[in-house]
Amino acid sequence: MSDNLTQVTTTSTSKQFTINLSDFWKGLIVAVISPVFTIILQSLNAGSLTFDWKAIWATALIGILSYLSKNFFSPSATVITPPPGVSQVTIDIPKPGETIKSETPLT
């Protein structure tokens, strides 16, 4: 073990075949951003800024359904994020059946 210990942040994604509130809000953001590309593409092709609301709603619906489907079928994962300014972190992972000895006492 290294003497230079760094605190990392860990977050877990939702379990496979489940959708949590965070997934829904992120999907809603995707649904809002996706139609922007449709508007830009149509405007470039038409030569003027026009709004085809049917295409905008269809793109938004496809965006949110795609994002939620991806999260629904993706397995859960643990994301380890180092603190700002730290470019690399080494993590010692125990072998199956081993336990990790804590560097700091648990209170």
Image: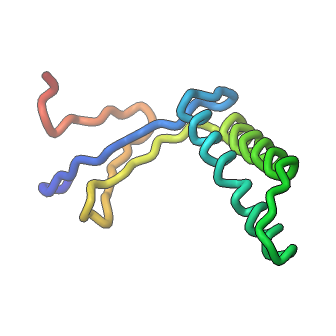
**How far across and how far down the image is residue 92, in percent?**
33, 49
Residue 2: which quarter of the image? bottom left
Q: Is residue 59 above or below residue 94?
A: below
Q: Residue shown at 41%/41% (left/top)?
A: 95
Left or right of 35 in this view: 54: right
Q: Residue at x 47, y 41 (%)?
A: 78
100, 85: nearer the viewer: 85
Q: Quadrant of residue 14?
A: top right
Residue reaching furthest top?
A: 107
Q: Nearer the viewer, residue 106 or 22?
A: 22
The image position of residue 26, as x and y in percent, is 58, 41
> Which quarter of the rendered picture does the C terminus lie within?
top left
Total label count?
A: 0
| For residue 85, side relative to residue 44 (left or right) | left
Q: Residue at x 78, y 42 (%)?
A: 61
Report whether 100 appears left or right of 51.
left
Snapshot colouring: rainbow
Residue at image point 42% right, 31% down: 97
Residue 57 higher or lower than 96, as above or below = below
Measured as percent of width and height from the top left, residue 50 is found at 81, 63
